[in-house]
Structures are given as structure tokens and as C-alpha cells.
């Protein structure tokens, strides 16, 4: 039996992973206790997605457990032991705004939870591949020190800079920068995964994501940029742009394209490898550009306003350089760009709110 343990299994990346790896012949053990509802309220609950997984995926086994609970995790890992071939850790507290309201919760979920999973892997299935969804927020606000140029609808990096052609690579420093408390807890987790890889020679991959998105995202104001934006475009709910003249740029990667990265890594794993991963130059947009696209898809004007104050630690411009991953796994490539991502999100939300 070939088992994949997937944390955050009812969330955006977790649920995409459940479907993807079930098709590859894995028995899926999903861990998700709907903490997203605790963080962001009823509108962000992933219960609808869990129900779909249980209906759609034969043999899917859901565990409403807390990854911070060592005893529960020990029992689970002992039960399946070396049949566990992969741990795909997507569960997290994902919002830098929310983290400041409850730093203890944020840190224990992101850092302590990751430590528990790493240690259970080391004890019970040390040959398994451990894949961690980190974040570009480990770089803090350092990208804002890059030489940016203000264009009509977006910030862009100066054409003479090495990052202009491909985006930001893994050599950017994570030191001497404001991370937000969320960024700090994800740094702790990120470094833990690297250290377990190097110290115990475990097969660990760390994926520092830009904006991860797709139709299964339960978007909310504090997390889920494109999904929440499209939700507001459909419903007419008010949307607030925070700072940077609405010209802040994000690269956006479809959940399928990211999970396909995980598959390639699983097939040929490496030890403690770190990748910046996102839409790159292939799939990115500014806030203003995203609003225009949402209005084009829905055929409606959006209801939005602008607040001058930006979110703490927020990036003015982020585009991931994905060449390192592509060099290691040349058969991987994108399936989706920004426009068809937004069309998929639109269609997914319409089916849930109609």
C-alpha cells in the first residue's frame, strides 16, 4: 500500500493534492480540522470541500486532527508506518494580518505543527518524501528595496536589474527585513524542514510560493487574493485595496501547476532543496489589472475603494524566478495563466453561490 498523508487536505492546495495523488494510485490520509473557519469565519470554512472529497475520491480517509497534537500524530504515523511514502504539508495559518492578533496560535500552527510532522516522519517513515508549502513571505519586505519603476497600472522592476527577465531567485537574503509575525513563523518552519533534511538526510522539498490560487480556494479578505477579489466581483460585495496605489504585483500559480511540481519532486526527490515557485513571468498581475480582468469576466463594475496604508510587510512587486525548479525537473511546465485561472475561479464560485 502506498500512502500519502496530506495536511490541510480540504484547503486549496491540499484538496488539489488529494485529487492529483489519488489518481496516481495513492491511498490518501487527509488531515484537516477546518482551522480556516477559526481564523477567518464561516465564509472561509473548507467543510464544503471536505464533503466533495469524501464524495468524489474512493478510499479517501479524513482525519479531523490538529497537527500540533503530538499524541494524535504519533498514533496516526504508527498506524501506517513505512507504508507512508509522502507527507505533503499544506496546513497553515496563512495571513500576516491575522497573525498579529494571536501570535501564539500563528506560531504553534506554523512552526510547532511542522516540527511535530517532521519528527513523526523521522521516527516512523524516514524514507518518505516530505514536501512543505512555504511562502515568499520568508523574504519579508526585502523585495520592496528593489529598484522599482511606477507604470500606469503596475509597479515593475527596472529593466537593467538581474531580476527583470525571470523574477526573484532563492539567493535573496531573509535577514534584516520586516517579515510580519506570519512570515517569522513560516521562516521557522522553512528552516526546520531544511534542517531535518540536512541533519537526518531526509528527502525534503521546500516550496516558497507566491500567490497560490484556483477554483477550490475559500477566499476571504485576509487571505486568498484572486478568489476573494472574484467573489466580490460576482456578489457586488465591497473590496478594499490597501496601499501602493493598487499597483502591487503578484505572480499567481494555479493549484494544479503547484501540485504537479510536488509530483515531479516526489518522483526524483532531493535533500533539503528550496524552490521559489509561483506564476513567474508566465502568470502575474497587479491589483488594478486583476480588477479589470474580473470586470471583463463578470461583465460588471466592481465595488471597491482605496486605503492609503499598505499591509505590514506587504510586497510591492513579487515575481518568482522558477528556473531552479525547471532546471531540476525540465519536464514540468505551466498549464494555466492568469486569465484562465480567473475564469476557473469565477465558474467555481458561481456554482457555490448560485
Image (cartoon, rainbow, N blue to C red):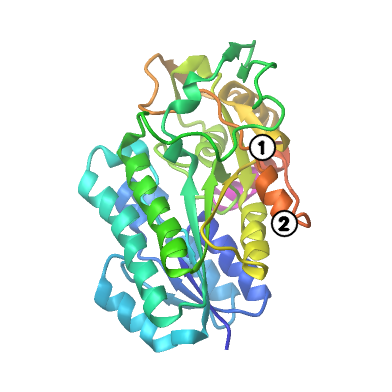
Does any portion of residue 54 appear in the rendered image? yes
Gap in Å between the C-alphas at discs 2 and 1?
A: 16 Å
- What percent of the width, then of the height, locates residue 231? 53, 39
Q: Where is residue 30 in the image (x, y as percent from the top left)?
A: 46, 72
Q: Which of the 4 image quadrants contains residue 307?
A: top left
Q: Nearer the viewer, mark 2 or mark 1?
A: 2
Contact between labelled residues 1 and 2, with CB atoms less than 8 Å apart: no
Q: Name the residue carrying label 1.
A: 280
In the depicted view, which residue is nearer to us: 147 or 76? Answer: 147
- Circle 2 SS class: loop
Would you say residue 353 sits in the magenta stretch?
A: yes
Q: Which region is colored magenta?
A: 346-354
Say whether residue 299 is left or right of residue 144.
right
Q: Residue 303, image x and y in percent?
A: 51, 23
Which residue is rendered at x = 47% and y = 66% of the image? 50
Residue 141: quarter of image: top left
In the rendered image, is residue 8 in sight?
A: no
Identify the mark at residue 329; answer none if there is no mark: 2
Residue 90 horizontal/vertical position (percent)? 47, 58
Q: Residues within 10 Å of mark 2 (few under 14, many from 20)?
A: some
Q: Is residue 120 above or below residue 47?
A: below
Look at the image and say whether residue 45 sits in the magenta stretch: no
Q: Residue at x 46, y 77 (%)?
A: 126
Amino acid at each position: 500500500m502506498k500512502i500519502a498523508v496530506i495536511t490541510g487536505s480540504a484547503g486549496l492546495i491540499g484538496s488539489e493534492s488529494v485529487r492529483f495523488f489519488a489518481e496516481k494510485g495513492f491511498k490518501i490520509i487527509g488531515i484537516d480540522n477546518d482551522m480556516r473557519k477559526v481564523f477567518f469565519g464561516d465564509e472561509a470554512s473548507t467543510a464544503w470541500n471536505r464533503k466533495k472529497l469524501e464524495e468524489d475520491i474512493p478510499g479517501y480517509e479524513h482525519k479531523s486532527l490538529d497537527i500540533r497534537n503530538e499524541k494524535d500524530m504519533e498514533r496516526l504515523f504508527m498506524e501506517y508506518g513505512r507504508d507512508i511514502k509522502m507527507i505533503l504539508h499544506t496546513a497553515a495559518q496563512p495571513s500576516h494580518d491575522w497573525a498579529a492578533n494571536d501570535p501564539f496560535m500563528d506560531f504553534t500552527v506554523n512552526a510547532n505543527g511542522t516540527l511535530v510532522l517532521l519528527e513523526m516522519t523521522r521516527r516512523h517513515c524516514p524514507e518518505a518524501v516530505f514536501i512543505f508549502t512555504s511562502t515568499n513571505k520568508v523574504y519579508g519586505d526585502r523585495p520592496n528595496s528593489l529598484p522599482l519603476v511606477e507604470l500606469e497600472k503596475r509597479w515593475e522592476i527596472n529593466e537593467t536589474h538581474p531580476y527583470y527577465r525571470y523574477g526573484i531567485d532563492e539567493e535573496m537574503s531573509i535577514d534584516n527585513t520586516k517579515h510580519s509575525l506570519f512570515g517569522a513563523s513560516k521562516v521557522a518552519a522553512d528552516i526546520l524542514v531544511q534542517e531535518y533534511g540536512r541533519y537526518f538526510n531526509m528527502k525534503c522539498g521546500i516550496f516558497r510560493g507566491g500567490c497560490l490560487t484556483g477554483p477550490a480556494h475559500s477566499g476571504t479578505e485576509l487571505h486568498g487574493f484572486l478568489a476573494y477579489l472574484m467573489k466580490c466581483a460576482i456578489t457586488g460585495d465591497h473590496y478594499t485595496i490597501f496601499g501602493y496605489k493598487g499597483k502591487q504585483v503578484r505572480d499567481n500559480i494555479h493549484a494544479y501547476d503547484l501540485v504537479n511540481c510536488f509530483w515531479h519532486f516526489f518522483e526524483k526527490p532531493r535533500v533539503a532543496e528550496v524552490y521559489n515557485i509561483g506564476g513567474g513571468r508566465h502568470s502575474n498581475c497587479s491589483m488594478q489589472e486583476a480588477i479589470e480582468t474580473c470586470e471583463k469576466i463578470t461583465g460588471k463594475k466592481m465595488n471597491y475603494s482605496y486605503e492609503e496604508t499598505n499591509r505590514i510587510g506587504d510586497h510591492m512587486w513579487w515575481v518568482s524566478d522558477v528556473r531552479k525548479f525547471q532546471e531540476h525537473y525540465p519536464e514540468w511546465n505551466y498549464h494555466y495563466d492568469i486569465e484562465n485561472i480567473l475564469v476557473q475561479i469565477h465558474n467555481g464560485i458561481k456554482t457555490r453561490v448560485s
